[in-house]
Amino acid sequence: MNLVLLHPEDLLNGSQARLTGRRFRHIVEVHRAAAGDALAVGMLGGRIGSGRVIKLGDAALDLDISFDRDPPEPLSFTIVLALPRPKVLRRVLRSLTVLGVKRIVLMNAARVEKSYWQSPFLEREEIRRQLILGLEQAFDTILPEVLLRPRFKPFAEDELPGMLRDSVALVAHPGSSAPCPREVRRPVTLAIGPEGGFVPYELDILSACGFTAVSLGERVLNVETAIPALISRLA
């Protein structure tokens, strides 16, 4: 936890906050904070600053807080991601949050197992928990928007074209001969398929929407490797 992320319900008044539970334990056990120590803090959805420990109890601590700067600039990316395996999903959500992506669409694809959509990891509170962990890592305070789209064709035909407006639309596909571009200076909508890639039918629909297929070379990457590689190249 690089940033102690505060929630509105933590506030005692305009300049003090009280922490309990996971954040309290982390501050005491990992940071080993004592009364008088200063910590980096941020208000969820707001600014970043510092908090000084003014009271430390057995199950809670109080902070004097102040905010003096904005969170990092977000990436102007929309990631359209075929739903990965549940355990991978948690890591991917944290990684995208750390990288600064603010809109994530989890969609279905032919090679996505139907059982993935029944995973408890897709519950809103579990998704939010992973996003919070990413924000704490990255010194950020702005939660990404996560959309669930379990029906590929209706989403691709009815919603996706509107999402592409004024952006560079790319689909990562290992079979493409076109290399992924570098340092794109416009908003990007990036579609990433399941481990086996999108099937031809899906690629045709994405192409009709306006996507261009690109690749990072001959190697077929898993989603956890592909995401940071693609974003670092494009950004």
Image (tube, rainbow, N blue to C red):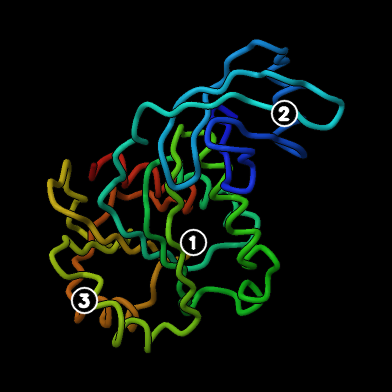
Return the disc, 2 or 3, that comes first in the chain's sequence: 2
Say what amino acid the circle numbered 3 marks: Ser
The vertical placement of 157 against 126, above or below, is below
**Position of 220 compared to 212: left or right?**
right
Return the disc, 1 or 3, that comes first in the chain's sequence: 1
Q: Which residue is mark 3?
A: 207
Return the disc, 2 or 1, that comes first in the chain's sequence: 2
Query: For numbered disc 2, what is the local secondary structure?
Result: helix
The front one of 42 and 105 is 42
Q: Which residue is mark 1?
A: 195
**Position of 195 compared to 12: left or right?**
left
The vertical placement of 123 against 29, above or below, is below
Q: Residue furthest front?
A: 13
Say what amino acid the circle numbered 1 marks: Glu
Q: Distance from label 1 to label 3 (Cα)?
A: 20 Å
Q: Nearer the viewer, mark 2 or mark 3?
A: 2
Query: For numbered disc 3, what is the local secondary structure?
Result: helix
Residue 131 % position (x, y):
54, 50
The front one of 98 and 233 is 98
Residue located 54% across and 26% down the image: 65
- Asked if labels 1 and 2 touch by Cβ distance under 8 angstroms, the answer is no
Query: For numbered disc 1, what is the local secondary structure?
Result: loop
**Position of 207 compared to 11: left or right?**
left
Say what amino acid the circle numbered 2 marks: His
Please rate how many residues cluster around mark 3, counting C-alpha atoms within 10 Å: few if below 14, some from 14 to 19, many from 20: some
Disc marking residue 26 = 2
Q: Nearer the viewer, mark 2 or mark 1?
A: 2
- Asked if labels 3 and 2 touch by Cβ distance under 8 angstroms, the answer is no
Residue 44 % position (x, y):
50, 45
Quarter location, residue 49: top left
Residue located 19% across and 81% down the image: 208
